[in-house]
Structure formats: structure tokens, C-alpha cells
Amino acid sequence: MDTTYDTPVTIAAEARKAIRAAFPGLKFSLTGTRGTGYGWLRLSWTDGPTDKQMREVTQPFDVKLGGHAHINASRKVSPAAERWARDQIAAHPGRWDQPHDFGGDYYAVQACLAVADLTEVAL
């Protein structure tokens, strides 16, 4: 019996198409690794969709890579998005309060941004 597996290069190309279809206009980087980490893909983008939204698009490709979180996703947040989050916190007092917030409003900002789909926000 001959079994054929997709290569990381093929899977990355398919994942790029899916990401572009799901989030038109989003600038992102999806790169492969070499050597010991062969088969792992690194995905990064700024602002835009949440980590959860991106995982919904990329999860099928994780399965093709063996299902062991082979796509490392990292959402970066721009200074404009942080300002937007601070404005949201000011507009909705108490909504983003975090227990033991020793970092000022750092954790409140992170909590707000974690669930904020920034694809429709004018930053």
C-alpha cells in the first residue's frame, strides 16, 4: 500500500489560500522551519482577527501536519490597537477589570484585545 503525505510546503500553500479567503486584505507571514523543527509553520499577523478566529481557519492544516500544534500562531498588536483597547476600557468601566491587576491596566488591555476582532475596527 502506497501512502502519500502532504509536505509542509504544500500545506503552507493551502493554508495561505485559506487565510486569504477568510481574511481578505490581512497582511500575514506564514513561514516554514528547517532542521530539527522541520514541518513546523510560523504564522504571524498584526491586529486583524483574534487568535481563536485564526485557529478556526488553520486547524485543518494542523491535522495534516500530524495534529500536534505544528502551526505556531502569534498575533501582534499595534500601538493604535492598544489605544483603541484603552478607549474601550474607558468607555466601559468595570467590564475589563482583572483580579490582581498589578500591571495597571496592562491585563485589562490584554483581555480586551484577546476577544477583539480588529478586522472591522478603523485604527
Image (cartoon, helix red, strand yellow):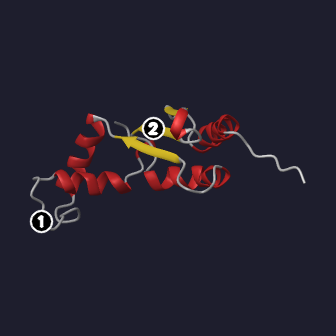
Placement of 113 over or under 47, stated as above or below: below
Q: Quadrant of residue 112?
A: bottom left
- The x and y percentages for residue 38 are 57, 38
Residue 100 visible in the displayed image:
yes
Q: CA distance from mark 2 to mark 1?
A: 30 Å
Residue at the spot 83% in from the left edge and 50% down from the top edge: 3
Q: Quadrant of residue 99?
A: bottom left
Residue at the spot 47% in from the left edge and 56% down from the top edge: 52
- Which residue does the numbered mark 2 point to in the structure image? 44
Q: Residues within 10 Å of mark 2 (few under 14, many from 20)?
A: some
- Which residue does the numbered mark 1 point to in the structure image? 100
Label 1 residue SS: loop
Q: Considering depth in this image, is 13 or 51 the residue closer to the camera?
A: 13
- The x and y percentages for residue 77 are 33, 40
Q: Is residue 122 left or right of residue 27?
A: left
Q: Residues within 10 Å of mark 1 (few under 14, many from 20)?
A: few
